[in-house]
Amino acid sequence: KLMFDCLYVMLLFVLLVGAFGAEEDTALCEILGSPEFPLLSKEGDITIGGVFSINSQISSPPLTFTDAPEPLKCSRYHFREFHFAQTMMFAIEEINNSSSLLPNISIGYQIFDGCDSNLPSTRAVMGLINGPERTLEKTCSSHLSVHAIVGASESSSAIAMLQISGIFQIPVISHFATCACLSNKKEYPYFFRTIPSDYHQSRALAKLVKHFGWTWVGAVRSDNDYGNNGMATFITAASQEGVCIEYSEAISRTDPSEQVTRVVRVIQSGSARVLVAFLAQGEMEILLEEALKQNLTGLQWVGSESWITAGHLATKGYSRILTGSLGFTLRKSKITGLREFLLQVNPSQDPDNNLLREFWEATFGCSLQSSPHGQTQCSGTERLQDIKNPFTDVSELRISNNVYKAVYAVAYAMHNMLKCGQSGEAVNHPCIWKDALESKQVVKHLRDVNFTLQSGERVYFDENGDPTATYELVNWQRNQAGDIVFVAIGSYDASLPNGKQFTMIGINTTWAAESLERPQSVCSESCLPGFRQAVIKGKPICCFSCIACAAGEISNFNSAECSRCQLEYWSNEDHSQCVPKVIEFLSYGETMGVLLTAFSLFGASLTLVVSCVFFWFRHTPLVKASNFELSFLLLFSLTLCFLCSLTFIGRPSEWSCMLRHTAFGITFALCMSCILAKTIAVVIAFKAKRPANTVPQCSAPLQRTSVLSCTLLQVLVCLLWLTLAPPFPYKNTAHATERIILECDLGSPIGFWAVLGYIGLLAVLCFILAFLARKLPDNFNEAKFITFSMLIFCAVWVTFIPAYVSSPGKFTVAVEIFAILASSFGLLFCIFAPKCYILLFLKRETSTLEEFSPFIRTQSVSVQLSKSTQEQSSVKGKKRKHGNLQFKYYKICCLFMFQV
């Protein structure tokens, strides 16, 4: 039984296979649905398909769901698209007549109407793939009736076509699809185009807007792949350029009229005076119709290449809205023989062709057949030479040139494929015959195509299938006849380095409403130099308030931030530029410098006068008793003290910085040394227990030695200071930010305070010794005046220290000069003023001891050592017990002698 069942199954299988085989032999490969027929076609060895939006409006009949859907109806004849189709035919005819390009091979074409819509474009691709026959061979063959497709004129339609053609690896070369998304080779590996990507155009538009200072713009786009992708790139690039978008609206041809009305009202109510319109021609016409109704004028339009050179928009009533428009478009080109080819188009060439008949009737406004609606019948004498419309116009061959280049790119790719073993040509691939030509092989050779047209233009594709992005900037201007012309006023080349891509030619520009003055479109007025932009919370960055820059900062027009000046510079009054800081130092030209100089010279002159007085009365007992040598040395040092203050005035230099402190230290050390010697002499003279001890302790050589030793010690300190770390000029920028204080840096603070400390030590010693001798007998008050002078000196310099540390800038130097002058005047007046008073105002010749005695306490008595020696030798043999009495007598004799 099991064996029987197996045999039954095998028999049934053989019967089924036979039945299916018999059915397959009788079946045919048949297209489902109605075939698509081309509007224009020609047979050839190689077939190139073409899809153009010859009609720009589509109407879909209602669906009943009981009968088969009626065919789609396209209307609104588009002369420019028919011009593109004829350009493709012209290029193919030109190649077929060429003996160097595809010799002995003819190119045919099949041209379909894409109706500027996705569905008809998709049906056109299906028609190109399947062919016009409903029933094919007995077996469905993989052989395609088309090898490449030129089209479509719109990005969304091109994407829809690629969804079908990509399955069969058919290359599509578009002349007008600019969406940047089509550069994605992973999604669209079989797509090429002869027009640059919108990525470059959108960035060029952003640079254009920025160039003219429009930072506040409106935006409107087509609600499709072309408009959405292009506007997205523009907004990103505009943001990078500092341009803000007030609003961004989208419209579509399928939108209800209320939507378009709303968009125009948004544009009209906006504050932006510049409108960037990234629209396809269909949407642009819809928007302009509504703009005319609402009287939308005065806007500066910036357009995309889709409509910026559309001649039919300029010839209609839209010119009063669009005059002055700016936009980037492709460079103009010239195609020799194209005009003559276009003017030959006539319905008589193919009387059964509905497309030619529609073209003729739309061009001349007549009917080739009798019309029941009373339309004028064509006379047959109509001539295209008398017509000026987008079809016959060859002055602006931009997109038409792209069609021309696309056909030639396919021809050169096929030429490179089919050349095999020809003389003088390298063979890098196996031989391919035209009968075995496959579309995927065309794709491979299209990537490597590189040729030059008769016009000199080079054609090639980059790794994304795109050409080099070069544009012309055109401006809508009126010529003398009142017609709108597209005048090139600039260019953009994406292959150049950033910063050199966008250039202006220098031609006068017409602006919105035919104004010669460039419109302004900003959210906030420009910030003047000296102010920075402060973004207003909740608003775009282009809406800002202007805040003044801080001291020491500058800005230019519309600066986002203030820039701080360099260390030695400061902002001017307007904060618009950095100027060198004012250099501050105590100069001879300012009031303080003049006063201090005057006091210094006055002090030095007064000291010289005192010296002259002392020299004139040098033979008087008073002068002799004042230790003539030390007094003159003291007066000399005081003169130097007054004059050394002058080294502190004026612009500090390397030598003046070293001189001022060392001169100050040495001169005051000499001065203090002289006073110290005088004080010691007085104390020794009146405190000695034995007169014999007074002579060696008060001798003149010893006094000179002491003065010299004390001074040389200060000189040694100064030499060490100058050797190890000398003072030097220093630009102090830390104390005052708005100016530079030019001062002398101490080099080594230890050296400065050592010099000052040594002078202070000498002054303190003088003060102590004078204080100890303040109660000398017989009203002798020389030591009291020295005490008082040292008290003033110490008080001045003790006060100087905090004032010196805390005084800013040039006042530091002024404080030091004041301390020098004050201490010098104190020494001069306290020590020498009483003596000069006695010498100048009292008559010594008639003065008696009694008359003179009241002034004894003001004299500085120094024992005359030579006379003291004689007195001591006269009592040398006396007894020791009378020594004290003799010493007292000696002092009384000295006093009496000085009175005489």
Image (cartoon, grey):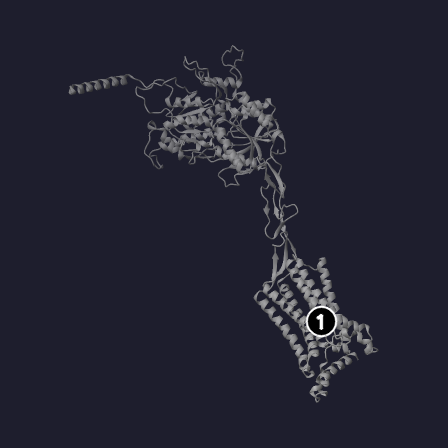
Instruction: Tell me the residue that label 1 is attached to.
Output: 786
Q: Nearer the viewer, residue 824 or 892?
A: 892
Does residue 696 appear in this view? Answer: yes
Quadrant position of the C terminus in the picture: bottom right
Seen at 33% across and 28% down, the residue is 436
Quick one: which residue is furthest to the top in this view? 372
Q: Nearer the viewer, residue 32 or 392?
A: 32
Q: Where in the figure is residue 321, as x and y percent of width and height?
A: 59, 26
Quarter location, residue 527: top right
Q: Residues within 10 Å of mark 1 (few under 14, many from 20)?
A: many
Quadrant position of the N terminus in the picture: top left
Seen at 57% across and 65% down, the residue is 725
Does residue 392 appear in this view? Answer: no
Above/below status of 256 relative to 702: above
Quarter location, residue 700: bottom right
Q: Where in the figure is residue 523, as x and y percent of width and height?
A: 60, 34
158 sits left or right of 423 in the view: right
Q: Where in the figure is residue 82, as x and y percent of width and height?
A: 48, 23
Q: Nearer the viewer, residue 26 or 848?
A: 848
Count of numbered tags: 1
Above/below status of 56 relative to 239: above
Above/below status of 706 relative to 31: below
